[in-house]
């Protein structure tokens, strides 16, 4: 990266589920959302996945989640602008969270030096966009060119989420178009994706794990649109074995320039329960 201070800083939020080592390596700052069990609130990422699921199982009510405060974003932007001229702030879909709105409100105080970008995605789908911004910065692009690149990347980055149950999504009020899938779901796995507004929309119901993974792989094939080279992110919440199976199949079927493995954080897991997810970003030759 040329120039001192650096051309721009990159900030995202914890729903990108970026592994800490990867975020540090790429110079990406993460502002956490909050998860609360009654009066006890934790920044996303504080509890391990197993700790979180144990606590959620023992709780009488589903935990609640909330976006970072405007003040938290203000502090993050002030800190970033100590060493960068500008900030690109990339966040979870505005169709799922108020995080983008809080970030934009905070950005108003910085006279155009902070650009907030709505990923219209979450988890791995958000992570791939954040990492693409880091690649753009490494390639010497400025903020305007990076935003233009991100708009194209956002259109190409696709995410599928596989749920063992719709219970958490329904109880958390994020179900939207997925409500038609609610009913008697004995051993039915439900896959969702994000629509053009960045909201969950149903893909398919399958019976049993084997069929669900086969369907997920078919979806990946379709999402790649005939392109054989791509970047992938494979994540899970308490379903590591499935995620490993999907990773191995991706590696066998595609020329993967990278396959990022991650654990879904507490905020995402609150709304999904046990889950697997795959994000794909086709790379043109």
Image: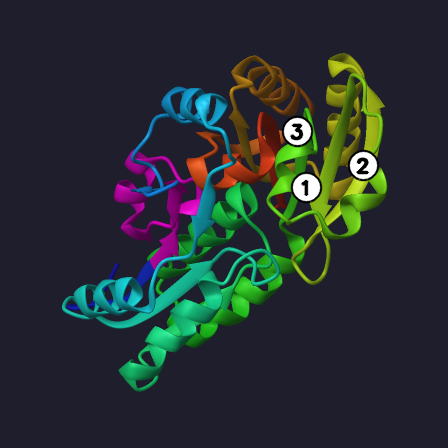
Ranked by sequence position, the earlier of labels 1 and 2 is 1
Q: Is residue 275 left or right of residue 228?
A: left
Q: Is residue 21 left or right of residue 122?
A: left
Q: Is residue 77 above or below residue 122?
A: below
**What secondary structure is found at the residue carrying circle 3?**
loop
- Structural crowding at the residue carrying mark 3, measured as other residues with C-alpha within 10 Å and reported as few (<14), some (14–19) or many (≥20): some
Is the residue under label 2 in contact with that under label 1 (CB below 8 Å)?
yes
Residue 120 highlighted magenta (yes or no): no
- On whether residue 21 falls in the magenta region, the answer is yes
Q: Earlier in the sequence, mark 1 or mark 3?
A: 1
Residue 182: which disc? 2
Q: x, y (%) of residue 21? A: 29, 35
Element carrying mark 2: loop
Number of the front mark, 1 or 3: 1
How many angstroms separate mark 3 from mark 2 (CA)? 34 Å
Vertical arrangement, residue 259 with respect to residue 78, above or below = above
Up/down of 21 relative to 135, above or below: above
């Amino acid at each position: 990266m040329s120039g001192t201070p650096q051309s721009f800083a990159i900030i995202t939020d914890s729903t990108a589920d970026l592994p800490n080592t990867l975020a540090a390596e790429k110079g990406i700052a993460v502002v956490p959302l909050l998860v609360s069990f009654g009066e006890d609130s934790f920044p996303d990422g504080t509890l391990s996945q197993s700790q979180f699921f144990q606590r959620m199982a023992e709780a009488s009510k589903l935990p609640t989640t909330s976006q970072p405060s405007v003040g938290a974003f203000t502090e993050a932007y002030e800190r970033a602008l100590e060493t960068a001229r500008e900030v690109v702030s990339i966040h979870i879909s505005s169709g799922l969270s108020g995080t983008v709105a809080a970030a934009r409100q905070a950005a108003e105080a910085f006279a155009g030096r902070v650009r907030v970008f709505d990923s219209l995605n979450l988890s791995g789908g958000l992570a791939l966009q954040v990492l693409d911004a880091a690649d753009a910065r490494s390639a010497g692009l400025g903020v305007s060119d990076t935003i233009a690149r991100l708009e194209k990347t956002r259109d190409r980055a696709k995410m599928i989420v596989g749920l063992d149950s719709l219970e958490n999504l329904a109880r958390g009020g994020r179900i939207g178009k997925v409500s038609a899938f609610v009913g008697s779901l004995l051993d039915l796995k439900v896959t969702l994706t994000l629509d053009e507004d960045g909201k969950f929309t149903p893909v398919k119901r399958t019976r049993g794990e084997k069929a669900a993974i086969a369907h997920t792989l078919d979806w990946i094939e379709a999402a790649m649109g005939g392109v054989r080279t791509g970047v992938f992110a494979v994540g899970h919440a308490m379903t590591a074995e499935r995620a490993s199976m999907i990773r191995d199949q991706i590696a066998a079927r595609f020329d993967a320039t990278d396959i990022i493995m991650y654990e879904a954080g507490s905020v995402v897991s609150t709304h999904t329960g046990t889950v697997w997810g795959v994000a794909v970003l086709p790379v043109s030759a």
